[in-house]
Amino acid sequence: MLISARRSRPIRRPPPRVAPAQPLRIPLPIASPPQTPTRKPLAADPFTPHKILNHIDRLRQFAAGQLIFPITVEIDPTDRCNHRCEWCVSERSHSGKSLDLSRFQSLMKELRQADVRSIVLKGGGEPTLHPQFNEMLDAAHGNRLGIGLITNGSMPRPGSREKILQTCQWVRISLDAATAQMHRQIHGSADFSRILQNIAYLTANTRGTTIGLNFVAEHRNFHQMSRFAELGRSLGVAYVTIRCVFDPGHSLSPEIRDAMRDQAIIAKQSETDRFRVFLGNFTDRYLTASNTDPLPYPRCLGPNLIGIIGGDGNVYACCFLRGHAEFAFGNVNEHSFREIWTSPRRQQVMNTVHSGRCDRICAGGLTAHRYNLYNEILNYLCANEKPHSAFA
């Protein structure tokens, strides 16, 4: 039987339905407002001498011939001192007198009303010896005055260290030695260890108070300059200042001057990002200067920016003139600060100071002092003719 096979027909299906093509949609990012690049706030160098430019209004008033009140007033709470530095610039003012607390408190209000912006407690004597030193800090702080302190570091009153950190913007301790033996020779005291403990406490507990040390170099201690810088760094202070003693009556030999320069260079090498070393006057301009040299500027005008009140209550023309009654304007125990500062007596004394006839150690530019910068600025601003003043 013959069997035939039939081929199956293919099944025909309709073509698939294809949806019409849709345009490609790409999601766009949500627009956001333009972002301002974040910039780290710029902090000025707290040690710059150009802080005076924060008070340009006072400088312009003085240049315009107006009577101005000081920006800072330096006050000696007491003229007593527990150290005996033989070259102390304030030795003549060691009268043993002190300011009364109640008068100090009212004085702070007077200074604030006169737009004085800061005070520095110093000596004169040793400010922390005053029995109401802590209350004085409270009085100044309560009147919103900036407060600085210059001290030998002994701080004998309980609670002084804590109060200093609560109220002061800066503290500078005059140490002048790197060892207890040298400190005893220079300061005539036996409290070096106690002072180091006080410094360590301040640096360990500060919450914004700048702590620094000062060293006055002379023929007995200059070889410790670099060691002193290392000591300051180990104690955690923000800076040390090293300067040559101001003693025009006893000039240093060329050999000592050269050795001082060498020590200054080594000390400067101790600097880090967090520790500064400032060298005050280790150049020929200062080391070989004489108080018989003429003033390096037409007039000494800088003291108009700083008031000086001694522990005896006298208001003096300059920090180098403490204890010199012929350069006092009046006494805060008898008159208000405003009365003294605006008195004819002050104008009379300042005329003598302006001409450089005070015969003090800064004469002839002997010291690397802040008054030098103030004098450069004020003498320029007060000049009648300023050639090329249209140029920067």
Image (cartoon, rainbow, N blue to C red):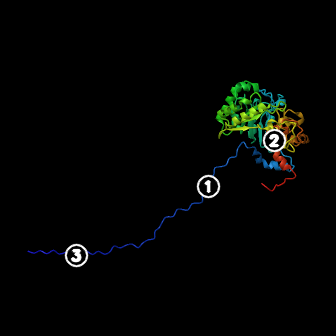
306 horizontally vs 197: left or right: right
What SS does tag 1 mark?
loop
* In the foreground, 60 or 261: 261
In front of the other: 136 or 386: 386
- Judging by the rendered image, the residue that carries numbered circle 3 is 9
Say which of 104 and 214 sits in front. Answer: 214
**Cβ–Cβ under 8 Å for marks 1 and 2:** no
Residue 93 image-quadrant placement: top right
State the residue at coordinates (79%, 55%).
391
User: How far is mark 1 from mark 2, CA to CA?
Assistant: 41 Å
Q: Amino acid at mark 3?
A: Arg
Q: Quadrant of residue 257?
A: top right
Above or below, comparing residue 13 to residue 161 in the picture: below
Residue at which label 2 appears: 371
With 201 as the anchor, is 244 left or right in this view?
right
C-alpha separation, residue under disc 3 versus residue under disc 1:
76 Å
Residue 289 showing in the rendered view: yes
Residue contact at pointers 3 and 1, CB within 8 angstroms: no
Q: Looking at the figure, which quarter contains the C terminus?
A: bottom right
- Identify which amino acid the numbered label 1 is placed on: Pro
The quadrant in which the N terminus is found is bottom left
Closer to the chain start, of discs 3 and 1, is 3
Q: Dot 1 corresponds to which residue?
A: 37
